[in-house]
Image (cartoon, rainbow, N blue to C red):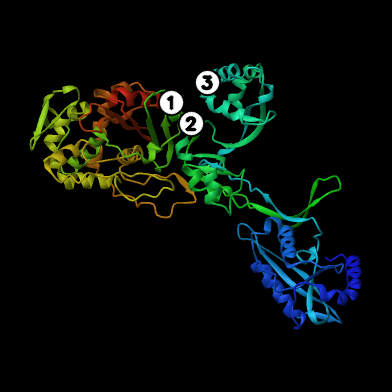
């Protein structure tokens, strides 16, 4: 509201303004006060007030340029915002004095609107016509000289990422920001060396050159960030850090998973908005906002982050030169909505521990067979980086013999005890295929070929399977279908098998076939279950277009295939899992070539135990029995503790 006393004094002072009119610069013409108000509002909007004459409330002269500068100054943070100005009814005249009600509609950052009424006062100066009385109250009735309208952001509470039981997986957890204060460091090289050594004990590699540069470019008493540690990790190094001169610490909370590697590539992280984030989202993000980067946190960032609120305040200097806020308008923040997933803490921890011990990049996916829920997604050795477990596109190697065998059994082209030769090599259209380690089995039952993973036996069987049989089996197991599980995922791509050599290669998982560990874990779950059901990862919001269930697999094919996969463990290449805790393990090893003229291979194992199906892939790991099987054993040991 206007301050009534001040307004009355100003109105009284206007009686002498007519005498001053002849010396004022701009002229509004002889039309009525309403026309002058319209010209003023138009000029305010377009930044040109030259068609309007102004006087101060005390009757002094003031130029249009000065008025516009004051308008901008008073508008403060809103100066660049869109504003709609409109006159509300006719101007009221009393002799040489008039007033007109106006409405001011601001569009605030983010699109919300703030509207209120104001008043423009005018005076007539002889033949110069009506002039606007400039006063800060025109912009808002509470404003005085020196004030500014400013925006104050109200951050929304970021929602948690939940497990299937509704309990938080990612939520606010205690952290300690470890820093240094330059003016308290007596020997910088010595400190940074000791700091790097100490942080290595909690698996943090310190870039001492970068830290030295940042410390050199900071103010002497600045808090220079070194690293943010979970409270549990900080406790391990706290005593040592406290002995180092120049160290400073700050307690905070961050959105974190239970452990650092916990499904890290799949979930993503929550960090302070980067410059790229701010540039891409100027209306929704501000410096200091927490933003999802990678994985589910980035995909669902808008839902998890919620909608920030904001307040419009008058920022006013106090007599002691401080700034005080007087709130005029407020929009409360709207908290984010959680994302519910199928990830199981116990299974995920077992998976993370299993891949952490493998130096080569590796991936493990575990799926509950009964409902196709993804229980764990692990990428080793540190959990971060590319989400190979869900999105990798690599050849499956001999694990694909599980798929080919389903097709052969469906066609009744093999029996478990029927003889299929396993020579050292086999040529197809001039191309030679061979077995791993130059294995030769001779004429043996097919169950032995499968258990020992004989490539040449499958090359021999390829014509009986045919491209149609391979495609049919893969389709029944969901490979290459369109999936929607609420996260980026690669369901596999099947070789066209459009030549004898390509068919032969595809039959044992080479050629143009590519899969992800998720695709193979899903296919394995389908074999164990007897039907394909698309994997589930995000439960809420539910994916809109999940793949339909596949047909029931024939008992006459599934039963023998189960027997074959059990014998891989009891009599074949996966025999290191015979004594794995938790009960009988079924599976298939795989060794996948991935580059021409290279001896390097990816190592695979797919299988199941009880209600859990899984797939493990080790990049450049060599043979499946040598690299993938040990990871499976560690996983099952951890899962069945």
Give the mark toward the camera: 3 or 2: 3
User: What kind of element bears circle 3?
Assistant: helix
Label 3 Cα neighbours within 10 Å, binned few <14 / some 14-19 / many ≥20: few
The disc placed on residue 261 is 2
SS for dot 2? loop
Q: Are marks 1 and 3 in contact (CB under 8 Å)?
A: no
Point out residue 105 in the picture as x, y percentages from the top left corner.
Answer: 68, 67
Label located before the other in sequence (1 or 3): 3
- Compared with 448, 367 (above or below) is below
Cα separation between marks 2 and 1: 9 Å
Residue 574: quadrant of the picture:
top left
Relative to residue 243, is residue 99 drawn left or right?
Answer: right
Question: Which is more foreground, mark 1 or mark 3?
Answer: 3
**Which mark, residue 200?**
3
Distance from label 3 to label 2 (Cα)? 16 Å
Percent of width and height locating residue 564: 23, 31
Residue found at x 31% / y 21%:
576
Q: In the rendering, at what x and y percent does residue 636 appear? A: 40, 27
Q: Residue furthest front?
A: 23
| Left or right: residue 494 compared with residue 71 | left
Specify the quadrant of the image occupied by residue 96: bottom right
Q: Mark 2–mark 1 contact, CB under 8 Å?
A: yes
In the rendered view, does 383 fall on the left or right side of 604?
A: right
Could one spot residue 445 in this view of the protein? Answer: yes
Question: Whole-percent x and y of residue 314?
Answer: 77, 55
Q: Which quadrant does the N terminus fall into?
A: bottom right
Tell me the crowding category of disc 1: few under 14, some 14 to 19, or many 20 or more residues within 10 angstroms, Cα based: some
For the image, the number of numbered tags is 3
Between disc 2 and disc 1, whose residue precedes?
2
Query: Which residue lies under the disc numbered 1?
Result: 356
């Amino acid at each position: 509201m206007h301050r009534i006393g001040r307004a009355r004094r100003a109105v009284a002072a206007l009686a002498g303004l007519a005498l001053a009119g002849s010396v004022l610069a701009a002229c509004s013409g002889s039309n009525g006060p309403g026309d002058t108000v319209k010209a003023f509002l138009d000029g305010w909007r377009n930044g040109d007030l030259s068609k309007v004459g102004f006087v101060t409330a005390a009757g002094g002269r003031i130029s249009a340029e000065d008025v516009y500068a004051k308008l901008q100054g008073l508008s403060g943070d809103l100066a660049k915002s869109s504003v709609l100005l409109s006159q509300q009814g006719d101007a009221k005249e009393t002799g040489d004095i008039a007033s007109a009600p106006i409405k001011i509609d601001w569009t605030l950052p983010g699109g919300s609107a703030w509207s209120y009424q104001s008043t423009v006062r005018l005076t007539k100066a002889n033949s110069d016509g009506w002039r606007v009385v400039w006063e800060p109250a025109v912009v808002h009735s509470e404003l005085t000289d020196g004030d500014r309208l400013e925006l104050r952001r109200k951050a929304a509470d970021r929602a948690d990422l939940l497990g299937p039981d509704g309990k938080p997986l990612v939520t606010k957890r205690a952290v300690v920001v470890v820093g240094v204060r330059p003016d308290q460091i007596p020997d910088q090289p010595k400190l940074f060396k000791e700091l790097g050594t100490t942080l290595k004990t909690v698996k943090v590699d310190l870039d001492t050159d970068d830290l030295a540069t940042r410390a050199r470019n900071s103010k002497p008493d600045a808090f220079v960030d070194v690293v943010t540690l979970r409270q549990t990790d900080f406790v391990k190094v706290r005593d040592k850090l406290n002995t180092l001169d120049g160290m400073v610490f700050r307690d905070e909370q961050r959105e974190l998973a239970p452990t650092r590697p916990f499904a890290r590539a799949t979930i993503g992280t929550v960090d302070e908005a980067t410059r790229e984030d701010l540039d891409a989202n100027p209306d929704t993000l501000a410096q200091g906002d927490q933003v999802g980067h990678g994985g589910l946190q980035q995909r669902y960032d808008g839902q998890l982050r919620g909608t920030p609120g904001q307040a419009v305040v008058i920022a006013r200097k106090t007599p002691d030169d401080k700034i005080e806020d007087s709130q005029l308008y407020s929009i409360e923040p709207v908290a984010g909505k959680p994302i519910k997933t199928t990830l199981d803490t116990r299974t995920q921890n077992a998976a993370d521990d299993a891949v952490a011990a493998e130096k080569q990049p590796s991936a493990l996916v575990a799926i509950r067979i009964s409902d196709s829920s993804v229980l764990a997604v692990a990428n080793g050795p540190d959990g971060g980086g590319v989400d190979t477990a869900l999105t990798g596109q690599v050849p499956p190697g001999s694990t694909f013999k599980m798929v080919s065998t389903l097709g052969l059994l469906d066609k009744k082209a093999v029996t478990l005890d029927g003889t299929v030769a396993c020579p050292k090599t086999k040529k197809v259209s001039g191309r030679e295929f061979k077995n791993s380690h130059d294995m030769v089995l001779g004429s043996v039952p097919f169950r032995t070929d499968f258990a020992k993973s004989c490539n040449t036996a499958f090359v021999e069987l390829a014509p009986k399977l045919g491209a149609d049989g391979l495609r049919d089996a893969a389709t029944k197991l969901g490979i290459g279908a369109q999936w929607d599980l609420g996260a980026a995922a690669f369901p596999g791509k099947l070789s066209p098998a459009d030549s004898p050599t390509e068919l032969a290669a595809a039959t044992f998982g080479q050629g143009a076939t590519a899969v992800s560990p998720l695709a193979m874990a899903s296919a394995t779950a389908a074999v164990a279950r007897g039907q394909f059901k698309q994997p589930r990862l995000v439960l809420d919001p539910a994916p809109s277009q999940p793949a339909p269930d596949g047909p029931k697999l024939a008992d006459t094919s599934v039963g023998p295939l189960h027997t074959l996969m059990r014998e891989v463990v009891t009599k074949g290449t996966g025999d290191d899992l015979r004594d794995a805790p938790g009960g009988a393990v079924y599976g298939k090893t795989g060794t996948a070539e991935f580059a021409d003229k290279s001896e390097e291979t990816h190592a695979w194992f797919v299988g199941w135990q009880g209600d859990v199906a899984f797939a493990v892939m080790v990049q450049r790991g060599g043979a499946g029995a040598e690299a993938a099987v040990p990871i499976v054993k560690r996983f099952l040991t951890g899962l069945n503790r």
